Image (cartoon, coloured by chain):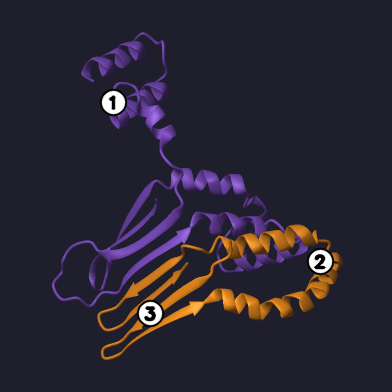
Chain colours: A purple, B orange
Amino acid sequence: MNEQRRQILEMLAAGKITADEAERLIAALERGGNGAGASVTAGKPAPRYLRVIVDKAEDMGGDTMTKVNIRVPLQLLRAGVRLAGLIPKDARAHVDEALRERGIAFDLSQLKPENVEELIRQLNDLTVDVDSAHGLVKVSVFCE
Amino acid sequence: MIPMFAVIRLEGRRRRFSFYLPLFLIWLLLLPFVLLALPIVLLATLLFGLRPLRLVGAGYGLLASARGTHVEVQHPHTNVLMHVY
């Protein structure tokens, strides 16, 4: 593994590859080892569900916190986007305006199935720690 | 395939309720109403310049993709669970 990493760095130093390419190659090495990372990622089954879990980040003593565990099929997300695509232009403008009034600058016409796929790809494993009255709360959003 | 069953579980301090909803029976009951509403939907889609088949397809897709939805909220004294099969 170290030898391969050294080779990548040598290629970068020689200017044969760019820094981005080197970074991707190293990331692939770390994922799969022996350069098989990319194929491992490609062979990974497509995620089917979006999970949202709200739990305690650490045991604060007592058990007063509300825990949430939600699993939504990604197909539902895709179907919703397809349905949103059928909204007439006039109605879409009204929705955009209503969202803007509530401080959400969002263009509904930009919501396309390919954007959702990109979002799903990027949403690998997102964890947000929220400091609340019940202590540190961990909000995890990920696809599985 | 559209969802056929749903489970709703409510758990309080003393009592616990579980509902097993046979959704397929609800779909069967709703079918005559859907058929009655179809001409109105068709008219509305034509009025708003929508493609009725795409709309019906997208609506069915939305319903069918609801299978596997799981919502669970645990509170110290109350638990709520819903699962769509």
Q: Are marks 3 and 2 on the same chain?
A: yes
Q: Is residue B84 visible?
A: yes
Name the residue tied to disc 1.
A33
Q: Are marks 1 and 3 on the same chain?
A: no
Binning the other alpha carbons within 10 Å of mark 1 as few (below 14), some (14 to 19) or many (20 upward) gives some
Q: Nearer the viewer, residue A99 or A111?
A: A111
Q: Earlier along the polypeptide chain: callout 3 or callout 2?
A: 3
Mark 1 or mark 3, whichever is nearer to me: 3
- Horizontal and vertical percent for residue B66? 53, 64
Identify whether A1 is placed above or below A111. above
Q: Tell me the kind of residue under disc 2.
A: Thr
Q: Nearer the viewer, residue B4 or B47?
A: B4
* Residue located 43% across and 48% down the image: A123
Mark 3–mark 2 distance (CA, rounded to whole Å): 38 Å
- Disc 2 packing (10 Å; few <14; some 14–19; many ≥20): some
Local SS, label 2: helix
The mark found on residue B9 in the picture is 3
Task: Tell me whether the residue at label 3 lies in contact with that at label 2, contact meaning CB atoms closer than 8 angstroms.
Answer: no
Question: Which residue is found at the position 33% from the left and 56% from the top?
Answer: A128
Q: Nearer the viewer, residue A83 or B3?
A: B3
Chain on which label 3 sits? B
User: Can you identify the residue that label 2 sits on?
Assistant: B45
| Location of residue A26 (image quadrant) | top left
User: In the structure shown, which secondary structural element does the residue marked by tag 1 occupy?
Assistant: loop
Residue at point 50%, 47% (across, down): A119
Residue B29 image offset from top left, x and y in percent: 65, 81
Amino acid type, residue under disc 3 in the picture: Arg
